[in-house]
Amino acid sequence: MSHSTDPFAPLPSIESHLDRISRTPGAPPALSSAIRYALLQGGKRLRPILAWHAAVACGSSGERSLDTGAAVELVHAFSLVHDDLPAIDNDDLRRGKPTLHKHAGESMAILAGDAMLSGAFELLASSSLSINPAIGLALLRELSAATTAMIHGQVWDTLGGVDGSLSPIDQLRTIHSHKTGALIRASCRMGAIVALGHADEKHPTLAAITAYADAIGLMFQVVDDLIDVEQPAEHVGKKTGKDADAGKLTYPSVFGLDGTRSEISRLLKASQIALQPLGANARSLGALAEYLARRTR
Amino acid sequence: MSHSTDPFAPLPSIESHLDRISRTPGAPPALSSAIRYALLQGGKRLRPILAWHAAVACGSSGERSLDTGAAVELVHAFSLVHDDLPAIDNDDLRRGKPTLHKHAGESMAILAGDAMLSGAFELLASSSLSINPAIGLALLRELSAATTAMIHGQVWDTLGGVDGSLSPIDQLRTIHSHKTGALIRASCRMGAIVALGHADEKHPTLAAITAYADAIGLMFQVVDDLIDVEQPAEHVGKKTGKDADAGKLTYPSVFGLDGTRSEISRLLKASQIALQPLGANARSLGALAEYLARRTR
């Protein structure tokens, strides 16, 4: 892979932006520390990376996507902190380190999650992107709808399913398209909206980015399920095999291992077809899809 | 009090709007039930009432404030649900009924709170008010900043203070101006912004509404502290005397009972002075301030 298509090349810019936006002088220092503990743990930064490359694929600079990517990452970090809580997934480890409620206590984890969610919307509403109010509002509409969808997915996951009348495969797709797909979709679309300067659903570029996002959003979760089955815990930095232990629906449990692998190939192909109209600008988005299909953690 | 200045006359319109916006066909039914349980428990609806009368005081119809008031009420309801959780205030009763985590379980209470917060921003971003994107964005900026301030106040309250170098009175004012004042301020300002069609800080009407809101926001909490000392629990519908038991800072503990009562008179007077430039349109806001100064629960 040549340097020009290394999809993680923007990581240093993204990390320093996250560092910058999480310094909030007026906030209680204990809250800021908790938020920075949860937000600045490294990780792939998939969502800001997607926003960056979607902006590039639509003809803008990646830098213009930074506030957008940071807002999405705040929502993602909020969801991890709340999902890890004892009353929900009761996870003690996240990326090999104690989860926030283990580190700072349960009340601080609840409040820090709340503040990250509120802070994501505050960041967008006060961003220089919002000098164009129609853009600011379109971004807020995308992010708030995706956040609500994500919470719906988490509720269905917690309850163990969507609706008894759906087949297991449809239940799985519905949970995933909400729980992880919606925010991945919003990352791509928000990067595109920043670059295009509008959110016209009939615009072919926005439609192409949306089709790409839908394919990789689902693929991301299918790969996650596969890793959960195939990898020992010490490689992943969190408990694995846990979904199967809990009797949760997963792709391998519904499709089998081979079926899961062909589903991944199918979705990778769909993402590549979606990008074709965008030409060379979309090279990094294409490389990112290939990385996501092959990742092992 | 004549009917024309009964500040709670808009309650039926507000209740039916809250009922309408909390019907969300695509959401998991268990989540919708939890949200409606937390949101539709009655109560004074102070924040939507303030938004309504602020809009009227600025020359608009109260109806135009309904989405704004509902968004603020969703944020308020979210904060009550999360603050009641076992890890934070551990309250079993709210308005005489089991709190949401007692009724629907702790995980559902966490997720329903999250969904109410996200839903508040989604409501504003998709409101017909946002046909004017500058207005929609100004409302989102107000609400997100107030929500973050409210969470800061809750963190300080949970930690037992702001900063050892502040006097007890300054600590109390800082906690209250964040924990309850910020959202009351936003309610008034958002109603005014809807009516005025802009958020120009130099506009004397917006400045008058803001001064009114600051006075009654603090007064509301001072009265709350007084009720906590003076009223037995069965009149209030939740545990009282609890703040004093927990050794928390309260107005009566810092100012004494007489000092607390004169602070209330001072703030009522300040709210009335602030309204003078608005004339007869602000009659209901004035009546509301008097009600808030005298309320006993």
Image (cartoon, coloured by chain):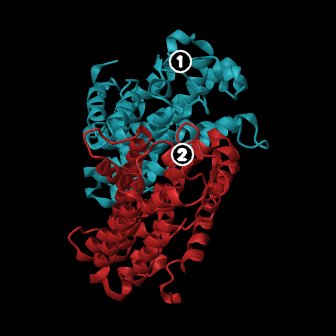
Chain colours: A red, B cyan
Asked if one can make out residue B94 in the rendered structure from this viewpoint, the answer is yes
How many numbered dots are placed on residues in this image?
Answer: 2
Q: How far apart are marks 1 and 2 (CA)?
A: 27 Å
Q: Is residue A13 above or below residue A231?
A: below
Which residue is under mark 2?
A: A82
Q: Quadrant of residue B252?
A: top right
Helix, strand or loop at disc 2? helix
Q: Is residue A95 above or below residue B279?
A: below
Give neighbour class at mark 2: few <14, some 14-19, many 20+ (Cα, 10 Å).
many
Q: Have a look at marks 1 and 2 and say if they share a chain.
A: no
Q: Position of residue A122 (x, y in %)?
A: 48, 56
* Chain of the residue on which disc 1 is drawn: B
Which residue is under mark 1?
A: B238
* Chain of the residue on which disc 2 is drawn: A
Looking at the image, which residue is at 33% across and 37% down? B52
Q: Is residue A134 above or below residue A160?
A: below
Mark whose residue sits in front, 1 or 2: 2
